[in-house]
Image: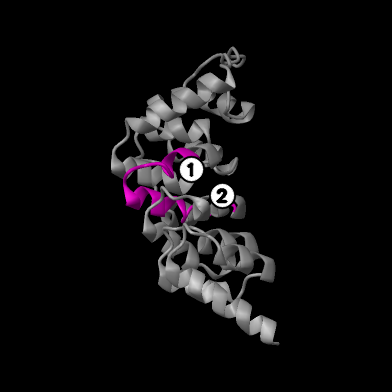
Amino acid sequence: MEETRLLGLDLSVASPEVIELLLEDVSHPEVFDEILKSNAHRPEILRLLTGNPAVPERVREEAGKRLNLPARAPQPPRISEEARKHNLLQKIQKLSVGEKIAIALRGGQEIRSILLKDSNKEVVLTVLKNPKITDTEVELIAHSRNVPEEALRAIHKNREWMKNYHITLALVNNPKTPPGIGITLVTGLRLKDIAVLEKNRNVPEAIRSAAKRVLQARKVH
């Protein structure tokens, strides 16, 4: 599919480890069908499809047919949500950087949440390119003091995200946001938020000074 190529992950050659992670937390239900279609002749992937309870029944059945399994294959056992999330984290930690980047583009919210804490900045930046990432997630990233500065710059460059007031406010109050970016955002803030920003000792002095100037200018008018 064109979308698969655009997102940089060829599901027909993706490793079983990557496929298994995507099955656990896909960005969109259509990914299950893409995996089946792209891996019709890879028994190891078909077995992953039949053995994962997160996979829709019709996809499991189709994969089972290709493996010549009984029509009424038993339902795969489900594990607790806590155990599933723990397994997800452990599996991701074992991936190479390239594999993490691949699932960063296709993974669901839980995968994205884990990868945003990765020490490799390219992995973090790739999460921001996931087409299913939400404004709420971006706002959390804009708040975070643990993400690389490049991630904050990438958020600032996205016009759609910067239309969201909460994202703008998070960026300007983040001590890691470059002053050159933070200063340009001050004038777009509400008066009460500018007043709070002026007293925020965590942000650079240049941003507090800009907030003070805007406050004084608005009082004059």
Closer-to-camera residue (141/57): 141
Residue that appears at 52% across and 53% down:
143
Q: Verify CB contact (< 8 Å) between mark 1 and mark 2.
A: yes
Q: Which mark is residue 137?
A: 2
Badge 2: how crowded within 10 Å, few (<14), some, or many (20+)? some
| Amino acid type assigned to the residue bearing label 1 in the image | Arg
Q: Which residue is mark 1?
A: 112
Residue 141 is situated, as x and y percent measured from the top left of the image, at 50, 51
| Amino acid type assigned to the residue bearing label 2 in the image | Glu
Give the farthest residue toward the bottom. 221
* 166 up-or-down from 189: above or below: above
Q: Which quadrant of the structure image shows residue 216?
A: bottom right
Q: Which quadrant of the structure image shows residue 88?
A: top left
Closer-to-camera residue (160/176): 176
Number of the front mark, 1 or 2:
2
Magenta segment boundaries in residue numbering: 112-134
Residue 202 is situated, as x and y percent measured from the top left of the image, at 47, 57
Of mark 1 and mark 2, the one earlier in the sequence is 1
Residue 125 among magenta residues: yes
Residue that appears at 39% across and 35% down:
18
Badge 1: how crowded within 10 Å, few (<14), some, or many (20+)? many
